[in-house]
């Protein structure tokens, strides 16, 4: 590695480049939407929004070559609409307590439920949760379930007299209103079309990464997966698909993960019980219509 490349990485040059390309492409897509067919807007817009979620994730863990306020400002715009960034940062930090991974009610990103809760559910809700454990379900109903769970939790929090998240939601609503003003008022892209053609596919793609990131296992080290995908998905998820490496070294910049993973692959897969898949195509063949695991946590 030459001196120029060292300096480029020292100041998070790759992450800056991602941010510049991402926002530039997003502005171009919204500005020229009228000249693009829906079958171009959906994959491109979805990719950009999911990429933005990945950039927000990177800002939580790394991207330390810039001041905290600037790092916050870069990833704050709610391109995906659905969740205030400060609350995502708080929730995801809780998720990284590895001993609690997959445990419902403790792990903020768990897709498991307790046996007692499962028994209280009606048949329709059970079928929805089971369908959500298939790749098709995660892409189709996953975003709606995620939003429903989020809204339910936040409404319950306020009903119990806890207003600590209200200021974040107020700022988020104003930010989304400003975003819609630019999208619809300036660019003429109807806001509801943006929700349907861009934001929803973006959340679906983001949930694809989390489809089988974690599984229930007695040993907490064996709960985190690795999906060895191609460059398209690697860039989309900023190599967070190599999730076992990320959980071991969460502060490692995204552009250093592939090299670290290659050099330590055997040890990493030994530690996680060989919880690995050769790409999202393999996952689709196995689990597109079959549940990747039961929604009921097997050890609680």
Image (cartoon, grey):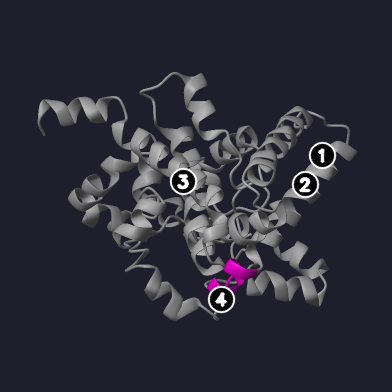
In-front residue for pair 12/178: 178
Between disc 3 and disc 1, whose residue precedes? 3
Where is 15 relative to 232, above or below? above
| Foreground label between 3 and 1 | 3
Q: CA distance from mark 3 to mark 1?
A: 27 Å
Q: Position of residue 75 (x, y in %)?
A: 52, 34
Give coordinates of residue 243: x percent, y percent. 39, 52
Q: Nearer the viewer, mark 3 or mark 4?
A: 3
Q: CA distance from mark 2 to mark 1?
A: 6 Å
Picture layout, residue 254 above or below residue 40: above
Q: Secondary structure at mark 3?
A: helix
* 48 w.r.t. 167: above or below: below
Label 1 sits on residue: 157
Mark found first going from the N terminus, 3 or 4? 3
Give the left or right position of residue 22, taking residue 133 as reference. Answer: left
Q: Are marks 2 and 1 in contact (CB under 8 Å)?
A: yes
Q: Residue at x 48, y 51 (%)?
A: 48
- Look at mark 4 in the image and give the residue it sits on: 291
Mark 3 = which residue? 54
Give the residue drawn at x 56%, y 76%. 291
**Magenta segment boundaries in residue numbering:** 133-140
**Quick one: label 1 or label 4, which is nearer the N terminus?**
1
Point 29% across, 45% down: residue: 257
Q: Which residue is mark 2?
A: 153
Give the quadrant of residue 200: bottom right
């Amino acid at each position: 590695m030459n001196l120029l490349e060292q300096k480029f990485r020292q100041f998070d040059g790759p992450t800056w480049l991602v941010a510049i390309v991402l926002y530039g492409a997003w502005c171009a897509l919204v500005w020229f939407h009228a000249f693009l067919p829906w079958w171009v807007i959906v994959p491109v817009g979805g990719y950009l929004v999911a990429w933005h979620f990945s950039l927000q994730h990177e800002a939580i863990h790394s991207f330390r070559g810039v001041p905290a306020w600037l790092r916050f400002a870069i990833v704050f715009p709610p391109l995906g609409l659905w969740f205030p960034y400060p609350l995502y940062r708080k929730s995801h930090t809780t998720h990284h307590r590895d001993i609690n991974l997959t445990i419902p009610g403790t792990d903020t990103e768990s897709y498991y439920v307790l046996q007692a809760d499962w028994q209280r559910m009606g048949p329709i809700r059970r079928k929805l949760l089971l369908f959500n454990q298939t790749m098709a379900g995660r892409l189709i109903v996953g975003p709606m379930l995620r939003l429903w769970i989020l809204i339910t939790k936040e409404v319950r929090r306020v009903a119990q007299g806890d207003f600590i998240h209200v200021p974040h939601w107020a700022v988020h609503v104003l930010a989304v209103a400003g975003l819609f003003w630019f999208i619809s008022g300036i660019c003429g892209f109807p806001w509801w079309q943006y929700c349907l053609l861009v934001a929803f596919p973006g959340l679906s793609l983001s949930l694809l990464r989390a489809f089988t990131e974690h599984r229930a296992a007695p040993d907490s080290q064996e709960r985190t997966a690795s999906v060895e995908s191609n460059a398209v998905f690697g860039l989309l998820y900023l190599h967070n698909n190599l999730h076992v490496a990320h959980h071991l070294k969460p502060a490692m910049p995204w552009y250093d993960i592939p090299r670290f993973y290659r050099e330590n692959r055997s040890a990493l897969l030994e530690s996680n019980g060989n919880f690995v898949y050769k790409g999202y195509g393999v996952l689709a063949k196995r689990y597109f219509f079959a549940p990747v695991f039961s929604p009921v946590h097997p050890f609680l």
